[in-house]
Amino acid sequence: MNVLQHARRSERALLLAVSAGVALTACGVTATEDAAKGPDTGAAISIDTIAVDQKAQAELPDAIKKSGTLKVASELDWPPFSYKDDSGQTTGIDVLMIQAIGKKLGLKTNIANLGADTIIPSVQNGRYHVAVSQLVTTPERLQAVNFVVYIQNTLGILQHKDYSPKVTPADMCGKTFLGTQGTGPLDFTRQYSEKECAGKGKPKMTIHVFDKSAATILAVGTKRGVFLTNRAVGEYVAATSKNGLVMGRETIPGSRTLSGIAYSKKQPEVGKAVQAALLSLMNDGTYQKILEKWKVTDQALKTSEIRNETGS
């Protein structure tokens, strides 16, 4: 086998390992059993013991009540929020949260794994009742769907420890950044490049976009650029990979955002029901336990709100 063939085979193997390898273990290094669990060291949470909240359930449209199922769109390669573990089981903060909401509503939860750029349209066109996949409530998305806000986020920089020159929040203009199509961090990266770089007479960022998060992480591991990502995601990826990925401790100024559970503007009852169920989870402590399980309690909200195109 010549060098080029070996390189191509290695790249395919790495990408497969990132895509299907357990919890997004970047660049094909298979994690040990303990490492594959990553920051998830919290106690097990029994979703099955959650009781129905009748007030929340009463908000549901009759058709969904009769179906007995909450149809959910997601993207299952964003640990620690929504992903498949080493046994192939769907798990994560978002997964447990929406399953818990389903239980409060007396519904089974059916989660579909879609591409990032098809999640919002699939709710908008009614194929799925809701979507949850760390969806930042951007103005563009708020024109398409409404959201029940359930968590806050801040961004940081994920990069290889040997990436040079090192990128910091204070020195991002003119640097090479990577992003995943249809995601909030990519939107923020583009906006930052326009406003904070070009708008202030500094060189724009060079931005390379990938259609899947696995490919984005692979590119970070091969030092093609750095990645602005939710701090919890970056810390998880850095903890589960063994190829030198590191997540900076500094937060990107102005990057605080709110993520929500998306639902169709044509079905406001769904939003009311989901919000009522989420508030019930906050009141009984289940919400906090889910965040504690993945050690992201700093991203908790004290209450939930519904956001629409007016931003309120």
Image: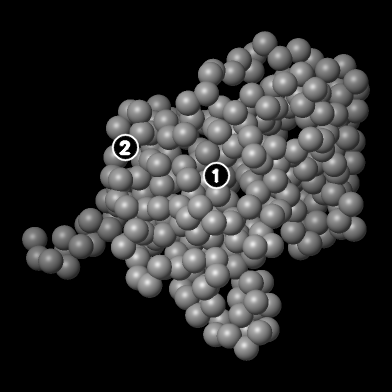
Task: Give the residue at mark 1.
Answer: 232
Most distant residue in the bottom direction? 201
The picture places residue 240, in percent across and down from the top left corner, at 38, 41
The picture places residue 267, in percent across and down from the top left corner, at 87, 41
Mark 2: few, some, or many residues within 10 Å (few <14, many ≥20)?
A: many
Task: Give the residue at mark 2.
Answer: 31
User: Would you say 128 lies left or right of 248 here?
Assistant: right
**Colour style of the rendered protein structure:** one colour
Q: What kind of element bears circle 1?
A: helix
Question: Residue at coordinates 54% horizontally, 56% vertically from top-left?
Answer: 250
Most distant residue in the left direction? 1
Question: Residue at coordinates 68% horizontally, 31% vertically from top-left?
Answer: 98
Please say whether residue 10 is visible from this viewpoint: yes
Q: Which mark is residue 154?
A: none
Earlier sequence position, callout 2 versus callout 1: 2
Mark 1: few, some, or many residues within 10 Å (few <14, many ≥20)?
A: many
The picture places residue 136, in percent across and down from the top left corner, at 69, 52
In the image, residue 264 above or below residue 225: above
Report the amino acid beneath label 1: Ala
Screen quadrant of the N terminus: bottom left
Question: Toward the viewer: 275 or 232?
Answer: 232
Q: Are dots 2 and 1 in contact, CB under 8 Å?
A: no
Report the amino acid beneath label 2: Ala
Question: Residue at coordinates 74% horizontally, 44% vertically from top-left?
Answer: 260
User: Would you say 67 lies left or right of 294 here?
Assistant: right
The picture places residue 88, in percent across and down from the top left corner, at 43, 30
User: Would you say 169 lies left or right of 88 here?
Assistant: right
